[in-house]
Amino acid sequence: MEEQQDWRAIVASSLGWGEGHAKLEDAVKGLEPKLRGKRPDSYPHSPWELLEHIRITQHDLLDFCQNPDYVEQLEWPHDYWPKSPEPPNAGSWDKSIADSRRDREAFARFTTETKLDLTTKIPKGTGQTYLRTILLAVDHASYHIGQIVSVRRLIGAWPAK
């Protein structure tokens, strides 16, 4: 059982580590409010769009793993992206960061505390396993965190002050 807990802890830690790339909190830290909705020239996303996309997708993947009554409600791609390049109000940025952190921590707890065999298929899925979905959440977030850093470089707001 200890061996199983070790690999689960490693997988869970990868949800928020900053070894191969910036952590989400570091990627968004100190970004001036006026730049949060700025899209660089010839680039399709603002920092807000990327942050909120990470949050929406991670939340949906977590719900897919945890909720036995999960029903796919979001339509790809438009429901997974915010409607505007700018946060809708002053509190939206901080709320999105806090919600992302909360769901990431819940995903980590699910990974380490569930009694489920993570290699089994998710009952409401189409063949996905719990482990595949957790790793998808890791990969998806790290990809878009890298994009946030790139966008910040392009708009002259990296490194964070």
Image (tube, helix red, strand yellow):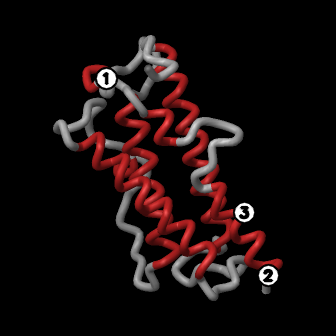
Looking at the rendered structure, the kind of residue marked 1 is Glu
The answer to whether marks 1 and 3 mark residues whose Cβ atoms lie closer than 8 Å is no
Q: Residue at x 46, y 41 (%)?
A: 25
Q: CA distance from mark 3 to mark 2?
A: 12 Å
Looking at the rendered structure, the kind of residue marked 2 is Glu
Residue highlighted by disc 1: 32
Say which of 11 and 57 sits in front: 11
Tag 3 or tag 1, which sits nearer the N-term?
3
Describe the element under mark 1 as helix, strand or loop. Answer: loop
Q: Check the picture and name the quadrant holding the C terminus.
A: top left
Instruction: Characterize the local packing of mark 1: few (<14), some (14-19) or many (20 or more) Cα atoms within 10 angstroms.
Output: few
Describe the element under mark 3 as helix, strand or loop. Answer: helix
Tag 2 or tag 1, which sits nearer the N-term?
2
Residue highlighted by disc 3: 10
Residue 62 vertical position relative to residue 42 in the rendered view, above or below:
below
Residue 89 vertical position relative to residue 1 in the rendered view, above or below:
above
Residue 14 vertical position relative to residue 12 in the rendered view, above or below:
above
Q: CA distance from mark 1 to mark 2?
A: 45 Å
Q: Check the picture and name the quadrant holding the N terminus.
A: bottom right
Among all residues in the image, which is located at the extreme right? 3
Instruction: Characterize the local packing of mark 3: few (<14), some (14-19) or many (20 or more) Cα atoms within 10 angstroms.
Output: few
In the picture, the disc for residue 60 is: none
Name the side, left or right, on which 80 lies relative to 138: left
Looking at the rendered structure, the kind of residue marked 3 is Ile
Instruction: Characterize the local packing of mark 2: few (<14), some (14-19) or many (20 or more) Cα atoms within 10 angstroms.
Output: few
Q: Residue at x 35, y 34 (%)?
A: 48
Among all residues in the image, which is located at the extreme front? 161
Describe the element under mark 2 as helix, strand or loop. Answer: helix
Residue highlighted by disc 2: 2
Answer with the quarter of the image where residue 74 lies: bottom left
**Residue 53 image offset from top left, x and y in percent:** 42, 45
**Residue 108 image offset from top left, x and y in percent:** 56, 66
